[in-house]
Amino acid sequence: MDELPRRLEPVIRQALSSFRVVVVSGARQAGKTTLVRRTLDGAGTFARLDHEATLRAALEDPAGFAAFGDTPRAIDEVQRAGEPLIRAIKSIVDDDAGRGQFLLNGSADFLTVPSISESLAGRAALLELWPFTQGELGGAPDGFLEAAFADPDLLLDAEPSSLGLADYLERICAGGFPEPALMAPRMRGAWFRDYVRTVTQRDIKDLTGARRVRELPKLLALLAARTSGELVTASLLRASDLGSRDTMEAYLGYLQMTYLVLLVPAWSRNLSAKIIRRPKAHLTDSGLAAHLLGRDPRSLARPTDTARGQLLESFVVNELHRQASWLTDEVRLHHLRERGGPEVDIVAESLDGRFVAVEVKSAPQADRHDARHLLWLQDKAPDDFVCGVVLHTGARAYRLDDRILALPVSRLWTTDRLSDT
């Protein structure tokens, strides 16, 4: 498979020029090793801790291992050597303030461990690599979030989309992991089955020592059935075999730690006393979610299949979340629902408080009725409301109101990036 450029590569290069340590974490098989090799381009030193002899050297002499070779010293799957190696790296960079000394990557958010995150605090840039975006897979610019905040009118400046519902369903089921996204559809099931088994039965057990890892595939499948829905802990606990709420929440944390599940928090500015505070849960890859639900493009095309709307929303959330991971200005995703009232699928908020609101529809067009909750939100917070967007599966982009647009889903990745113009 030819290597496809990743949006995060220039971000990593810039971080190496500014920080002593750069950490790239993300899901297994998302392409981290390939990205690190591309970034090094033959320079520095590269070590893979999924090789037993290399791992043994790192475990037996972490200080010597960390000091070996030319910089940048790239260490792949660094979480396998644990805290002693991180402390050795800390000691080296504390004695030498030079930039770009270490490029670390791992398949778990191991920096959620307080002792490790404290060791690298102030010394490291922390970046996340997610599975491919549609733009990365197809050579499109992925500029929706940039344009939406800077100049929403740019979102209307495009030829009609050539994609329809059937095309989007194909993309949903392919997902963004490099191998299944580019392989024959009939082979994906075997890949996803092996992936779930490896992450839940080996990686999580090795990282956490969890005793009931056999329950994790069921928990992941339950979350797939609820993807794009609010996380109701009591309901999830009743459906699982994990016994206690504490155990279930711990195991949910393991799925987040290994980048299988994304929780999108509720958004509120005290707009109403009825705002729901629960997060929404999304599987981080729509292809994996479709596999766990036993769906393919043909079954999702049935008008009665309720999973279509869920998977399309998670597909959109994942595209936006991946775009946010490389933006210069931080953008965070939320959702909004008022009890018994309006709800908005996605609220993307910048650090200065401005926000873009997005609704996702599987229909081939949108009208003002589809935008009614966006209009409500605009009235509630007019000063910071940049624009509202109703995404649909049709061809045309058009205006529904002064600051509210109807756009094909494909505008997420076919809008030009401002940094490239």
Image (cartoon, grey):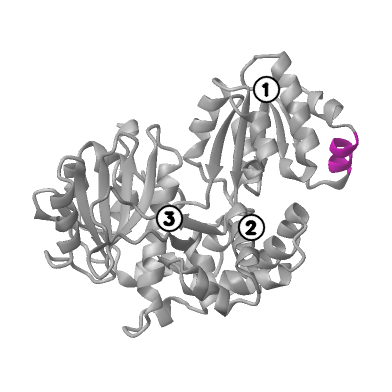
* Tag 2 residue: 254
Our reading of the magenta stretch's main secondary structure is helix
- The quarter of the picture where residue 98 lies is top right
Q: Tell me if I can see residue 402 in this picture.
A: yes
For the C terminus, which image quadrant? top left
Mark 1: which amino acid?
Answer: Gln
What is the crowding at mark 1: few (fewer than 14 residues within 10 Å), some, or many (at least 20)? many
Is 124 displayed left or right of 133 in the figure?
A: right
Mark 2 or mark 3: which comes first in sequence? 2
Mark 3: which amino acid?
Answer: Val
* Tag 1 residue: 101
Q: Residue at x 71, y 58 (%)?
A: 204
Q: Work out how far the residue at label 1 is from the one at label 2, CA to CA, in angstroms.
A: 30 Å
Q: Is residue 141 magenta?
A: no
* Marks 1 and 3 in Cβ contact (< 8 Å): no
* Count of all numbered marks drawn on residues in the image: 3
314 vs 215: above or below: above
- The quarter of the picture where residue 64 lies is top right
Start and end of the magenta stretch?
A: 53-60
139 vs 196: above or below: above
Residue 277: x %, y % from top left? 38, 58
In this rendering, which labeled residue sits more in front, label 1 or label 2? 2
Is 99 displayed left or right of 66 in the figure?
A: left
Q: Residue at x 61, y 66 (%)?
A: 248
* Tag 3 residue: 264
Q: Is residue 57 magenta?
A: yes
